[in-house]
């Protein structure tokens, strides 16, 4: 039986969520070229999580040419056997990627997944001729595979035996510590073909297909990233794996504060913490100016900036340090604190200007899963997004802080200077964030609905667009809720209006078109 890989093939072919450094397209099967690329992915020079080799798809200027050219389906079995032989005989230490074939239209595409290896650096044969005796190291440079030479080779050798913490096997855990339900929900959400076969696969097979299990076949061990995402209580293995949201109503120096702690699978607590902050502390101010038809709107803190700051902390913190991610909210600012700080190769002045690019990522596998779930893009885009969001909201610029030893990283988002303030001639009014997209969603709900039913009612096909523009803002504003909040990724999940949502729906239905104030979503 063919077991698919835990990927969304459409996203891979159209290169959504997967940067060029992690995917290479080939029109046909060339064992020597494939070997060099697999070796480069295994070396994972920038800790990005390895990559994918897609056979049967031509490439033009770094982009796949669709529809695919395809490969002969009768050759797939021979290609897999050749891969096995190459892994034993042509690469050192031995390395075996996973592979699967897919049907796209009437064509067959062969995909090889080569995760970052646990025993790098890897070297392979330069050519596969019988008299070829030269071996070399290969790495990725942008979207190309190149031979490591000079400083690049020396730096690669310096990575020997240094596997990022999240990609290491955990000797204190067992296969049973991975949740089949959480694994299945992840595969279902990202649209992987493996979701259909996951319930019937042995846990060890499923874990290795998703690369969350390591160790030999006689003693498989979960990898740390598997426990972080697919165990109900990761803090049992990694103390302080949590997000603390603390509110200081009188400011940070006040005597009173409120605290809420989020613990659980990493993706869940990231989303829950973001939604909680948005629901509890984000306020939109609508300023109506005399003689002007369009009102001025701004938020005390823009949600996009908060999302990026929290996801950045989850992505880049150390899970070996017993310090939680902390979100501090006060009337003056919102602060996100994590430990440790950015790598010393990142200059703080470049970071503050939005120009910083990290050369190597601390958590290659955490980033991989966050990207699959559309929680981050990676590639150092978080800080520029924060800068743009604050500027677009009319807020003061954000502040980024660390010490000389880079023991911590702090992102401070100052409150909008005019948030909820009476200016005398204008009338501020705080309302839930009801964009035109949210209005359409509220109008479409008349009971409890599955996500696919809401997509159909709204005439949409793009699930990510629906989630980010319609569902997430409505839930953050407290207008829509889940029927089963304890299992947010359940395929049986339904959505319904809250009491506030029903009141808002009725208000929107009763007012005329001239009364409704619109602003871009």
Image (cartoon, rainbow, N blue to C red):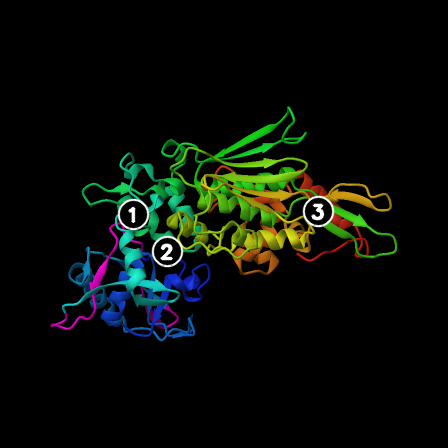
First to last magenta residue range: 104-132
Residue 458, x across and y down, in percent: 61, 57
Q: Secondary structure at mark 2?
A: loop
How many other residues sit within 10 Å of disc 3, few (<14), some (14-19) or many (≥20)? Answer: many
Which mark identifies residue 505? 3
Residue 89 drawn at (x, y percent): 15, 61
- What residue does disc 2 label? 46
In the rendered image, the quadrant that contains the N terminus is: bottom left
Q: CA distance from mark 1 to mark 2?
A: 12 Å
Q: Nearer the viewer, residue 499 or 221?
A: 221
Label 1 neighbourhood size at 10 Å, few (<14), some (14-19), many (20+)? few
Element class at badge 1: loop
Circle nearer the viewer, 3 or 1: 1
Q: Whole-percent x and y of residue 165? A: 34, 43
For this orientation, the residue located farthest to the left is: 131
Q: Quadrant of the C terminus?
A: bottom right
Residue drawn at 45 percent across, 34 percent down: 323
Q: Nearer the viewer, mark 2 or mark 3?
A: 2
Nearer-N-terminus badge (1/2): 2
Image x and y of residue 259, in percent: 57, 29
Residue of label 1: 162
The residue that appears at 43% across and 48% down in the rendered structure is 343
Q: Answer whether labels 3 and 1 touch (C-beta < 8 Å).
A: no
**Disc 2 or 3, which lies upstream in sequence?**
2
- 466 left or right, relative to 364: right
User: Is the Cβ of the residue at disc 1 closer than 8 Å to that at disc 2?
Assistant: no
Q: Secondary structure at mark 3?
A: helix
Q: Residue at x 26, y 53 (%)?
A: 120
Looking at the image, can residue 447 be seen?
A: no
Q: CA distance from mark 3 to mark 1?
A: 55 Å
Question: Is residue 167 magenta-colored?
Answer: no
Q: Which image quadrant is residue 291 in?
A: bottom right
């Amino acid at each position: 039986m063919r077991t698919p890989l835990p990927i969304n093939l459409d996203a891979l072919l159209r290169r959504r969520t997967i940067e060029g450094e992690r995917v290479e397209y080939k029109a046909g099967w060339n064992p020597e070229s494939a070997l060099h690329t697999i070796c480069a992915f295994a070396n994972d020079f920038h800790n990005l999580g390895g990559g994918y080799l897609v056979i049967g798809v031509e490439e033009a200027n770094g982009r796949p040419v669709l529809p695919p050219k395809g490969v002969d389906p009768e050759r797939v079995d021979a290609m897999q056997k050749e891969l096995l032989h190459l892994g034993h005989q042509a690469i050192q230490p031995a390395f075996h990627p996973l592979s699967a074939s897919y049907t796209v239209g009437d064509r067959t595409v062969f995909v090889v997944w080569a995760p970052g290896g646990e025993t790098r650096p890897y070297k392979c044969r330069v050519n596969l001729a019988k008299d070829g005796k030269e071996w070399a190291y290969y790495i990725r440079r942008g979207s190309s595979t190149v031979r490591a030479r000079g400083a690049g080779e020396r730096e690669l050798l310096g990575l020997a035996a240094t596997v990022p913490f999240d990609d290491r096997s955990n000797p204190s855990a067992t296969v049973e510590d991975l949740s089949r339900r959480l694994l299945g929900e992840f595969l279902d959400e990202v649209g992987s073909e493996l979701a259909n076969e996951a319930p019937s696969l042995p846990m060890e097979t499923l874990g290795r297909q998703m690369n969350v299990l390591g160790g030999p076949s006689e003693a498989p061990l979960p990898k740390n990233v598997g426990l972080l995402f697919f165990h109900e209580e990761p803090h049992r293995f990694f103390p302080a794996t949590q997000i603390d949201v603390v509110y200081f109503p009188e400011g940070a120096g006040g005597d009173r504060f409120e605290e809420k702690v989020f613990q659980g699978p990493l993706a869940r607590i990231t989303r829950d913490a973001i939604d909680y902050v948005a629901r509890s502390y984000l306020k939109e101010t609508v300023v109506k100016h005399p003689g002007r038809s369009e009102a001025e709107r701004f938020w005390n803190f823009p949600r996009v900036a908060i999302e990026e700051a929290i996801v950045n902390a989850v992505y880049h913190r150390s899970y070996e340090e017993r310090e939680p991610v902390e979100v501090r909210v006060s009337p003056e600012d919102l602060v996100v604190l994590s430990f440790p700080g950015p790598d010393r190769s990142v200059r703080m002045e470049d970071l503050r200007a939005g120009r910083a690019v990290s050369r190597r990522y601390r958590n290659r596998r955490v980033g991989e899963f966050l990207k699959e779930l559309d929680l981050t893009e990676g590639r150092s885009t978080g800080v520029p997004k924060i800068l743009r969001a604050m500027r677009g909201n009319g807020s003061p610029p954000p502040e980024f802080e660390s010490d000389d030893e880079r023991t911590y990283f702090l992102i401070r988002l100052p409150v909008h200077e005019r948030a909820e303030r009476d200016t005398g001639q204008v009338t501020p009014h705080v309302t839930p964030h009801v964009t035109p997209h949210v209005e359409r969603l509220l109008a479409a709900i008349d009971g409890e609905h599955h996500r696919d039913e809401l997509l159909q009612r709204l005439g949409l096909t793009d699930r990510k667009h629906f989630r980010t523009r319609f569902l997430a803002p409505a839930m953050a504003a407290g207008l829509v809720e889940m029927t089963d909040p304890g299992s947010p990724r359940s395929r049986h999940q339904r959505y319904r209006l809250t009491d506030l949502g029903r009141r808002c729906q009725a208000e929107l239905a009763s007012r005329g078109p001239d009364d409704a104030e619109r602003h871009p979503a």
